[in-house]
Amino acid sequence: MPDLLIELFSEEIPARMQKRAGEDLQKLVTNGLVEAGLTYASAAAFTTPRRLTLTVEGLLANSPTTREERKGPKADAPEKAIEGFLRGAGLTRDQVETRETPKGNVLFAVIEKPGRPAGDIVAEVLEHTVRNFPWLKSMRWGTGALKWVRPLHSILCILTDEAGTQVVPMDIDGISSGDSTEGHRFMAPGRFSVASFEDYGKKLKVARVVLDPAERAEAIWHDATNMAFASGLEVVEDAGLLAEVAGLVEWPVVLMGKIGNDFLELPAEVLQTSMKEHQKFFSVKNPKTGRIERFITVANRETADNGATILAGNEKVLSARLADAKFFWENDLRVAKSDMSVWTQALENVTFHNKLGSQADRIERIAALARELAPVVGADPDMAEEAARLAKADLSSEMVYEFPELQGLMGRYYIEASGRDAAISAAAEEHYSPLGPSDDVPTAPVSVAVALADKLDTLTGFWAIDEKPTGSKDPFALRRAALGVIRLLLENGISLRFSASLLPPLRFAGAHVALTEVRNLERSGSVSENEENARTFGKIARTAVDLQKRIELRAPIQADEAALTGSLLAFFHDRLKVYLRDQGIRHDIIDACIAMPNNDDLTLLVKRAKALSETLKTDDGENLIQGFKRANNILTQAEEADGVEYSYGADAKYAETDEERALFTALDHAEAKIAPAMEAQDFATAMHAMAALRSPIDAFFNAVQINTDKQTVRRNRLNLLSRIRTLCLSVADLTKLDG
């Protein structure tokens, strides 16, 4: 069984595209081979800046001969039907058989496809792969029509077995396949032939090329950490940067340089971001001070002066970059220490959304909402409002304009420099969190208030203008914002009634929608152009005033507001299902809890769902559900048949069996525990008491006949089932559970 080796050698492939390209090459080629009948034992793809490589081991030498039997129309069918069948089978009339069947004589085609050599199939599959490769971006060069990410120079394609090595012949737009490749561009130029994948890897290593990106990354990290350790320093970990740098070099040479003394006092994050974004340098810090003092760069070649010239050039370029950063930092500090309102005023000219106003408008909404939420999360209202007004001020700073990824972090530095409380500065950095499922959740009350206000304003604002997520489209990251709210509430144990809490942000957003429309009409100068525009202007202005009054006077909820809060609450429930499903809680358990009262308190809802989930993991809990469903089914059928509701209370004096009397006693004990537990929101205790009913309910069903001929006894037993149903449904809507 031969082994296949493919290499597509080109100009430098962008590092961000290499991993995906290797996966695509393996998938397209191996899928194509299997579809053609060639199975294999294993396959692996490798990438460097200049090559995509695929090795396939244990490939069949030939595809198997296949025989397919295809049933056609009747022998006396219309001529056109027979011609279509023959055309599809690729046969003539005398090549098909006529067989007797219960439905008459029917035509059958037996199609035999002889096996083909692996080389022929590989050539077809590889050519199709190259011509249809799914690059994110591709280019044409010269006079050819072939597209590749960068000009493709050569194709290595060989099959190796015990008999030797065979080149798979092919030609793609003038590029002929062969058995040779090139080594490092500078240290080992020139082509050389290879006979197998093992030979290929060894010769590449001699030619100063490390084929495996994981091996390159490991070598970079090993050398970098050793070099830093020798100087008493540490390399700041950055897995993304490591993967990117490993994709920039074929022969990694690690060098450590110095940062000029003028820049050592810059915040560590500024240094780290500047070096990473512009130069692809790793930061090296002093573990004692936490200060960034050196940098690691990775060259693609060895030099006679051991990288001294390379380092000198990098240090010169870095100094210019950091001089800019230092200038931004010092200018921003002057503004922060004097008057940060300059930045917030500048945000009046930055549009957040054309229907929701400017960033300054949004800050006003967030500040008002943070004040509303502060008592709920245990924060000081004045401090929460001030933190919200300053949290996004750094968006106008020069540093954040240059490095947007530093938003929030620079706000913390600038607010600290202005002399304000540490809780306010921390809120500037933390209010964006959590950004994802693994991101840390703020716990400081002021930060939590501003973070909740920020996310709720985003959600209610876009709900107010009907810009909701649809399918896989979520351009404003509303699903992420909803998950952020859920995690903020749950991980901080905050009990918040959404139905009431969503009203203020909805009203703030509604007022700004109306006011923004007024401003747009005023700016366009079309207010007085005709009577129609004047009426429109007046209507919008009145709407804005009405909304403003609703906010100020705490007006009762309106029908349109109720519809919006209901829709938004349903959206939160959907996101909560995803969040809890990842934690192992079944969707039907969540549905059973959502169906209960107070389902707009997500913290309460999750406590109930977790308690029910734990109960159902026990034998008593699972069997109780079956007993409940049996009771509910019998009761429902009886109520439908009799046309009455059995909910008037059962009486133990009509009990005829010990099991019946035992169930009355068990229900009395359960009710005595469940009612106060539910009042105290102690769902675990309530569920445990409910699960304890399993044995008496089982014994009751085994011992008694519900639909007895004695009508008084029958009614009493049906009322007893009603009592079981009512008690169980007081804990969760068990009818929503599967099974």
Image (cartoon, grey):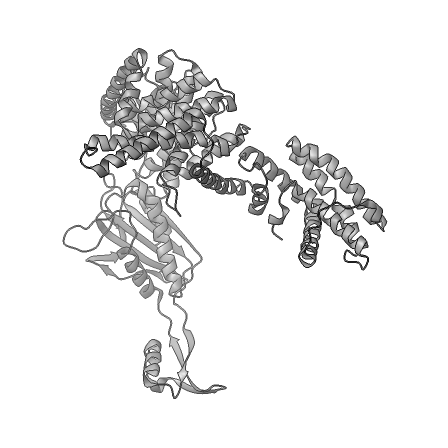
Q: Above or below — where is 725 with respect to 557?
A: below
Question: In this picture, is 119 found above or below 220?
Answer: below
Residue 718 visible in rendering: yes
Which x, y percent locates residue 2?
A: 39, 61
The quarter holding residue 12 reads: top left
Tell me: 43 left or right of 250: right
Picture residue at 18% right of the left edge, 35% below the top: 529
- The percent coordinates of residue 480 (x first, y second) are 42, 37
> 684 or 721, which lies in front?
721
Q: Nearer the viewer, residue 28 or 296?
A: 28
- 701 to the left or right of 461: right
Question: Is residue 283 in view from this perspective?
Answer: no
Residue placed furthest toward the left: 143
Q: Residue at x 40, y 31 (%)?
A: 507
* x and y, in percent, of residue 319 in the image: 24, 21
Q: Quadrant of the N terminus?
A: bottom left
**Residue furthest front as drawn:** 531
Picture layout, residue 255 above or below residue 128: above
In the rendered image, the vertical position of residue 83 relative to residue 377, given as above or below: below
Residue in the foreground of this view, choosing between 469 and 667: 667
Picture mark count: 0
Residue 564 place in picture, x, y as percent: 43, 39
Residue pictured at 74% horizontal, 52% vertical: 718
Q: Name the foreground residue: 540 vs 618.
A: 540
